[in-house]
Amino acid sequence: MFKGLGYSLKQAIVQIFRNKGMTVASLFAITAMLLILGLFFFLTVNVNFITEEIKDQFDTIEVFLQDDQTEAQAEVIRNSLSQLQGVANVEYISKAQAMEEFKTRWGDNAYLLDGLASNPLPNSLRVTLENLEDGELVAEVSRSMSGVEDVRYYQTEVNKILRISEGIQKGALVVIAFLIIVSVVVVSNTVKLTVMARQEEIRIMKYVGATNWFIRGPLLLEGMFIGLIAALIALGCTWAIYARLMAAIGQQAVILLSTSLVETNFMMINLTWIYIALGISIGAFGSILSMRRFLQA
């Protein structure tokens, strides 16, 4: 067993260097595929992460009360909203509290609000949702209640974000599937050349009693080696690219989106196993396709 494995490893390495042109072509194809896959992986994971963060930020409905509503009347409305399906919590926000929150958002420019003759902000109720799917119904019920001046809910914006996220995911899957097919074909052609060059040798090996797996072993390992090397090359390039992107736009993302991007180490640890698994699988599958056709496996 170990003797056969040693022979397969030796022959696989010999064939990799013997067919340098096709080996390089296979390495380039799989590496390019994995690099593009990695970029789509970065995009998809970060879009999903940002989407979840934004959903958490927009899981509230602002119910603005009419100026003549007393706190007792506001409490009645609050109790009614608390009983609705999908509502996790309802908090009363006074005009003074709303102004303090507004000043906090304005930061260094909060002093501009001190010149106001009176507080123009209304008393309100902040409704926290358990599920965004119930948001539209809760908003409609809130609008119909007596004493409610206006209701602010960003369902349209959230739906747009969700549609964009879904579109990116579907597009990424299509591109990745296409690139995997191309890589498998290239590896298959590489192994195919090896089989064609060794047809006479294979015929003799079969004649003297060599088993099919004894013949297939070196070819299968050749494809797997090519896939593994391509995965390691792609991993190094991807790590460098993502680290540079994080350094360049990581801080801007926090400012513009109020959320950070996925950390480099966490992203790359997960991507390492994906790259290695895909690289070896593509190489092995390409070899199997070639062997089934030429060795009638």
Image: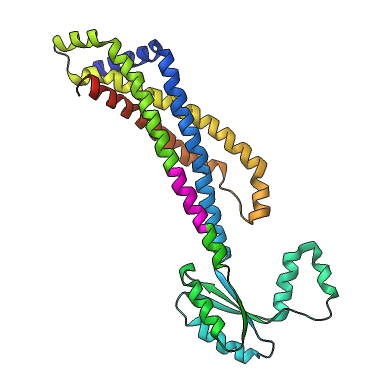
Residue 243 found in image quarter: top right
* Quadrant position of the N terminus in the picture: top left
Residue at the image point whose x is 38% and y is 15% from the top: 16
Q: Height in image: 44 above or below 180?
A: below
Give 117 or 99, whichever is nearer the viewer. Answer: 117
Tell me if 243 is positioned left or right of 45 in this view: right
Q: Height in image: 32 above or below 47?
A: above
Residue 60, percent from left and from top: 56, 71
Stretch in magenta = 162-173
Give 246 or 164, whichever is nearer the viewer. Answer: 164
Q: Is residue 232 visible?
A: yes
Residue 220 found in image quarter: top left
Residue at the image point whose x is 72% and y is 70% from the top: 102
Q: Is residue 166 magenta?
A: yes
* Quadrant position of the C terminus in the picture: top left
Tell me if 43 is positioned left or right of 296 in this view: right
Give the total number of marks visible in the rendering: 0
Residue 143 found in image quarter: bottom right
Q: Height in image: 196 above or below 168?
A: above
Colouring used for the render: rainbow
